[in-house]
Amino acid sequence: MLIEPTAAGLYCAAGRFHIDPWEPVERAVITHAHGDHLRKGSRAYLCADAALRLVQHRLDTSAIVEAVPYGEAASINGVRVSLHPAGHILGSAQVRVEHRGEVWVASGDYKRAPDPTCAPFEPVPCHTFISEATFALPIFKWEPPSATIAEICAWWDEMREAGRPAVLFGYALGKAQRVLAELARCTDRTVFVHGALMDLTDAYRASRIPFPPIARATETARGRSFAGDLIVAPLSARGSTWMRRFGDHSSAFASGWMRIRGARRRRAYDRGFALSDHADWDAIVQTVIDTSAERVFVTHGYTHQLARFLRERGLDAQAWQTQYEGEPEAVE
Ligand SMILES: [Zn+2]
Ligand SMILES: [Zn+2]
């Protein structure tokens, strides 16, 4: 086994490095900057160039962080390691590991749908593929993102006519910036954001991702009405005093979870938009086919369901126990 699950995380013994470890280790190769994949405390980190700012933002300054361009091979203790676009968030990477003619790829999180904030997913041929399975059930099927963004714009238009603020919740890293970048294509009106999104959004801007004009909601004049404005906020802002300034508003949540459990989840929001940074069922199955892997290990999400499906199709597939969390569900 070139890579195996251990108590600290996925481990490559030949190269003596971990991939997205959840315990502090000597050397960590990182797929992306989400908290469950990038944890503090390791001595040295390797990530993709495009992820460097986000990774540094999350880590203590004492950590050694090295970055490599997509596709460029590095040698770690004689094992060939390269990072390839995963299409999940800015700088997200699949990790390709090659040793003595054997090739493994760890996907991290990935999606196949277009996203203006990151490089598109590239299938990487391998013998063994380690895949996430956050939305690995056939009921998860995404509309093209352009259609979902059009729904968001229509909702904003509706609220403008009604003279109410439209507050859109999404994950602070990745989803919020993706929505903002998509909006840049259809509006030049100012979009208001929660302060917690500013640093992360600036990191994206530094990577030349275009955004519409953005203003921090707290920096507006006291008593300003947000009637007809769109406000993008992280989930943590729900129910906080920060929300009071918007008064009678319409709320929405942008998440893959909005595809199901509609009745239960939507009670907490006026609207739900099924926009996910993870692959849907068809995209996961297609990706496994595209890698031409004969063996698949599944790390988080609907792991057993995906592994069983792949075994029925003649692949050697197994679920692995990991500490990755997948896409958090709505906080109620
Ligand atoms: Zn992620
Ligand atoms: Zn994940």
Image: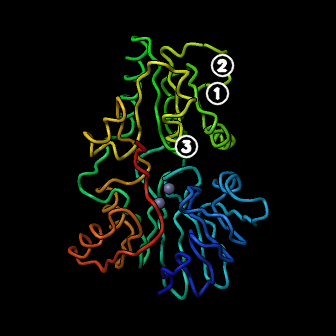
Quadrant that contains the C terminus: top left
Q: Position of residue 7 (x, y in %)?
A: 52, 80
Residue sticking out furthest to the right: 62
Mark 1 lies on residue: 216
Q: Element under label 2? A: loop
Residue type marked 3: Ala
Image quadrant where residue 254 sits:
top left
Tags 1 and 2 touching, CB below 8 Å: yes
Mark 1 neighbour class, 10 Å CA radius: few under 14, some 14 to 19, many 20 or more: some
Q: Which mark is residue 220?
A: 2
Q: Is residue 194 above or below residue 39?
A: above
Q: Few, some or many C-alpha atoms within 10 Å of disc 3 (few <14, some 14-19, many ≥20)?
A: many
Amino acid on which disc 1 is placed: Arg
Give the residue drawn at x 60%, y 78%.
80
Q: Residue at x 39, y 69 (%)?
A: 291
Q: Residue at 75%, 65% (x, y): give it.
A: 63
* Residue 144 image position (x, y, % from top left): 34, 40
